[in-house]
């Protein structure tokens, strides 16, 4: 994990959710690349027409056990039948 440029910022966590009819997978990781790989794998298993949404989040400094968004949402979808995933960042 890379060092944070601003020590007062919370450590990032990456969540992902497959969205669409029949979709039932989601996950979380502290490693962006692992989260992206897991999201792509889940999307390839999901029914046709589903998309995946990945978010950069963190636990708030208050200590509450909720995710606080700290970045943009990223949308992924299957480009074609070969399983390539395109990402809109």
Image (cartoon, grey):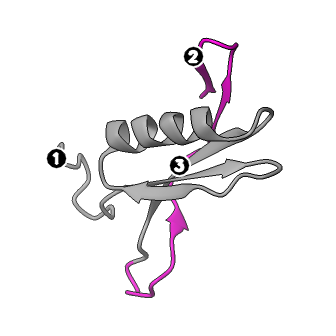
For the residues bearing labels 3 and 1, Cβ distance under 8 angstroms: no
Q: What residue lies at 59% left-to-right and 28% top-to-bottom?
A: 89
Look at the picture and state if 37 lies above or below 72. above
Rendered location of residue 84, percent (x, y)? 57, 16
Label 3, label 1: how far apart the Cα atoms are: 17 Å
Residue underneath mark 1: 3
Q: Is residue 59 visible?
A: yes
Label 2, label 1: how far apart the Cα atoms are: 31 Å
- For the image shown, how many numbered marks are present on the structure? 3
Mark 2: give few (<14), some (14-19) or many (20+) Cα within 10 Å.
few
Label 2, label 3: how far apart the Cα atoms are: 24 Å
Give the residues in magenta: 61-89
* 9 sits left or right of 79 in the view: left
Q: What residue lies at 18% left-to-right and 46% top-to-bottom?
A: 1
Residue underneath mark 3: 71
* 80 sits left or right of 43 in the view: right
Rendered location of residue 62, percent (x, y)? 41, 86
Residue underneath mark 2: 84
Look at the picture and state if 50 lies above or below 58. above
Could you say which quadrant of the image residue 88 lies in?
top right
- Return the residue nearer the eye: 78 or 65: 78
Rendered location of residue 49, percent (x, y)? 80, 33
- Return the residue nearer the eye: 28 or 64: 28
User: Which of marks 3 and 2 precedes in the sequence?
Assistant: 3
User: Which of marks 1 and 3 precedes in the sequence?
Assistant: 1
Q: Is residue 73 magenta?
A: yes
């Amino acid at each position: 994990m890379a060092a944070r440029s601003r020590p007062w910022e919370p450590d990032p966590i990456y969540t992902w959710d497959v969205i669409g009819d029949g979709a039932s997978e989601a996950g979380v990781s502290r490693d962006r690349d692992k989260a992206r790989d897991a999201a792509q794998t889940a999307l390839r298993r999901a029914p046709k027409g589903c998309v995946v949404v990945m978010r950069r989040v963190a636990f708030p400094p208050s200590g509450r056990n909720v995710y606080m968004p700290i970045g943009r949402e990223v949308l992924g979808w299957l480009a074609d039948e070969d399983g390539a995933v395109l990402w809109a960042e």
